[in-house]
Image (cartoon, coloured by chain):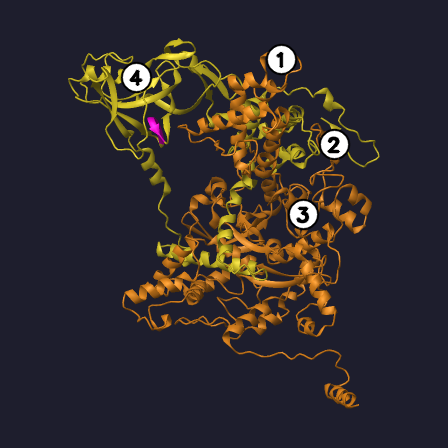
Chain colours: A orange, B yellow
Amino acid sequence: MMEGQLHSRLHEAEGPSNDFLEFSAVSRHHSRYNNVVKGLGQRKGSHILGENGVPLSLDEYMEGYHNGFRNDGDDAAAADDEGDFEANFDWDVSDDDDWNGVEDDYIHSFAVIEDINSNYDAFLDQFGTSIGWRLEPNQKVAIDLLSIIRKTNAPLCLYEDIMRWYLMHTGKIYPQQKLGESPDYLSRTNLYKQLNFCYNIHPKKYNIRKDVVLPGSSSQVSIVMNDAASMFQSLLTDPRIKDEDYLFFDDDPFASPPSNITHLGDINTGQAYIETYKRLISKNPLKKQVLLPILFYIDGSATGQFVDLKITAVKFTFGIFRREARDKHYLWRTLGYVPDVSKSFKSRGKRIFVDSNHMDAESRRNSTDSKEGRKKVSSGLKNMQDFHSILAVIFESMIPLQMNGFVWNFHYKGILYEGVEFIPFVPYICCDTEEANRLCGSYISGGKQLCRYCCCPRTQSDSPYLSYKPKTFKWINGLIADENLTELKQISQHCFQNNATHLLRFGLHDELGVHGGTPMEMLHAILLGIFMYIRDCFFEQTGSSEYSNVGSHMNSLCAQYGLLLSRQSDRDLPKTKFSKGIQRGKLQGKEFSGIMLVLLTAMYSSEGKKFLVPSHLKKSKEDKFPNLERYGN
Amino acid sequence: MLLNKLLQWEAWLKSKEMLRSDVLRSKQKLRYLMYLIKSIGNRQEGNGWKLIKFHGIVHMADDILKFGVPGNFDTGPMEAEHKPTKRAAKVTQKNEETFDEQTSQRLLETHLLELASEEMQGRPLWNYRRGYSHVSSNALDIDIVSDPPVIAGAQYIVEYSDRTSKYVMSLASSVKNNASIFVEQEFINFVAHLQNKVEAWCQSLVVKTSHHRNGYIFCASPSYRGCSWKDWVVIDWGDYKCPCRLWGFVDLSFLPVNNSVNHGGYSPILPAVYAIVEHTGVEGSRLHRHYELFKRIHTEVRRIRQNHVVGLKLYLADVEAIVDPAVVVPDIGGAPNSYLHLRPRGEWDDEFVKWLRSTYETVPSSEREGSDLDGKEDLTISCI
């Protein structure tokens, strides 16, 4: 009786509409949490994804862009105006709405084509040579020390320890004093804040984090990316770039490609560049236009032997740099990182927990998107859709630049060309086969067709003398629009909406789009492909070294020749010394040319010939190793 | 044949420049190469050669025509770009939720430090429109090339030993390891005879073991990294060039111009720095057979007995006559003085180009009926 009364009173006090526990947001004013607020604020505001999380088409996006979502007044960006970028130094780097002349709309501010240039103008006005600022001694000390720590892969916290040691032994602080009490000490955080300001790094243009609920797996991921316009500016102004790094015909940025190109070399000699140049660059010499190839590179990499954390960066560089220059790390910028969507089961687990209505799960409900974890099964198609949604978010800030071009005061060989209009296009995306198939929306494995370029059926893919109809993005899009699943299955293409690469402007030399824009590259296709298979075939024919005398003997002979070839005055040879022989062992792609070389040497040698064709079988047609002549000699 | 072709093909793909006409021809020629791979490789495992990496060769020429040489879109150099990312990833908390963000932040910090470093070297970011000043890298190159050729390395001297009643060689400089060193007596005798002939001008002739020239280091040491290391070089003998093996270097620049010293093929010996070499003769000067990477050569020897070389034939060669390094390995299982001379890697692509320009091979009969399509599929098939 008493229990019943107590329960009803409590129920009255809660109010009849409260089915769940009520949560109230706790406000925090500590500066540390402002960063958290800022981070959360940056997470919203992607316009490239539709209601269902699927990327918009290019036309839809540009329509929305021109109709003003650019000026939507990004709530998040507006909300985080207060005190998120305070610094303990004299210059005024407080976070007002105008950072070097750029509005605070965090992602689309540069979409007007002159904004990259005007931002740099404002940077010069505010912080240029007129002030004559130089690095101060304590900044130089901190920079040197941090550079050493970075180079040696030492933990970052070592900075404070070394600083304490240095300041203590130079008599600048007493052992019981705090580091911050010394005027000579500059903390890491403050140093980076100062450098951010000095080098025009706006904190809202870099490391932008967006939380997106993916349409395929309905899992929530955080996409980290950088603003394309800031990256473009950073790449164009990098002090390490030399004049000889640029790739222009006749050293003239505005020179058109020669009418008759007989030699193929760098990117500007290919059809993609030449035909796109003809279509996009004005013939009016008064218009100072430069065609800007943007070369993307997408590849994942493991970050450690014992760490299950893969990082997939979307990087780019410009094709106005020479190939040799493009090999340098400072000529690449990262547009964003593709989060690992294979862990969608976590979102599903979170959803199960929240939907269980357990008391402990109620606190999670507020932080869980209503769509998150709703879908049960993850499939190849859904992963593909998710991948393209992520890519679309990463590409978003680049699309207006790509469609409108941008103006830049370009310095080259001692001349400042003012008001140069750069017209970007994407000739190709460098990636391995798996990533390329993803980008094209092709099946990663299996299916009736293997090729992402053409309609060659799997059964005919080893026939060298046959050619097939190419796949074009328009054709594939048409099939997807018609939901022609049968034919899509025939050509091993996934049926998903709006491939993110269709947002990019590929070369105008053909209509293949991404299907012709993911070229087969040497490392994976030839060195780790053909060469590796040939080695395996050879040992398949001789027999494995474990079971076959011939295989074992050839493996040993190859190892010896590898050793001999490694001791030569000509250092131009590939690596030929392999500690585990050539038959097995995990090898890098570049090592396979060395494998081919030692194999050829061994087969060419008298010993190799004797062994591969035993004397008693020499005249017989049933040689133990019938292919010697054709392999090596 | 296949391995030759594959190595030449790789070298061609790595070229910095290709003739457009060659690339056009490669459309057809590479199909023949595919046929060779398929028929010789005869892969039985898994899907055989029904692989995208194999089929992709068909599209290779088109890719080159569209985007320039394959080096433009090769991911090999770009794989190295992972290093900074991996390094940045190491100094994160390895928290799955914030991993990308922290890695990106570390990379940004590294970028800031690099910009600061540039500023300290006089290239602040705000100088872009004035132009950044860089020290010309060409000046450095000129210094390297213009380095005068020198002989260096460990130093050996030859003395007569009363105990053994023969000439012996002793080490005049310190070496890192004290392992036993063995030197051919024929070589010691060659140096001893030379020393005897020039003793009027030099008491003790020093044999050195390395020679630096045009950025190359030529080694001729009886003991280097565990065993003897005698490099091969191409020597220009005036009327022909051939690969020769280096045995040591002697500085005879102290000799007067007018002398009557006669040794190692010179009469008289002009004042200069000389290499002691083993010669492969005119046979070594012959060109490689078409399309092949290896050529079998033999060194000149005094005598071979019971399949063993029992007498060396050594010569002096002016180091100025060294024109190129050479890659030569013993022909194991062949004659004791037989070697395999590898064509310089810089020429491999030339051979592939020659092959591309040669007449098209006829389409093998087995490939003419390659299609097993029944015509129901909407695919265009053309037999080339």
In the picture of the structure, the residue carrying the numbered disc 2 is A460
How many numbered discs, if any? Answer: 4
Is there CB contact under 8 Å for labels 3 and 4?
Answer: no
Is there CB contact under 8 Å for labels 4 and 2?
Answer: no
The image position of residue A168, as x and y in percent, is 30, 67
* Chain bearing mark 1: A
Circle 4 residues within 10 Å: few <14, some 14–19, many ≥20? some
Q: Amino acid at mark 4?
A: Gln
Q: Quadrant of the C terminus of chain A?
A: top right
C-alpha gap between disc 2 and disc 1? 36 Å
The image position of residue B195, as x and y in percent, is 21, 18
In the picture of the structure, the residue carrying the numbered disc 1 is A617
Q: Have a look at marks 1 and 3 and say if they share a chain.
A: yes
Q: Amino acid at mark 2?
A: Gln
C-alpha gap between disc 3 and disc 2? 22 Å
Is A545 drawn above or below residue A157 in the view shown? above
Q: Looking at the image, which is closer to me, A474 or A577? A: A577
Is there CB contact under 8 Å for labels 4 and 1?
Answer: no
Q: Amino acid at mark 3?
A: Arg
Element class at badge 4: helix
Q: Looking at the image, which is closer to me, A447 or A537? A: A537
In the picture of the structure, the residue carrying the numbered disc 3 is A438
In the picture of the structure, the residue carrying the numbered disc 4 is B185
Eye-nearest disc, 3 or 4? 4
* Chain bearing mark 3: A
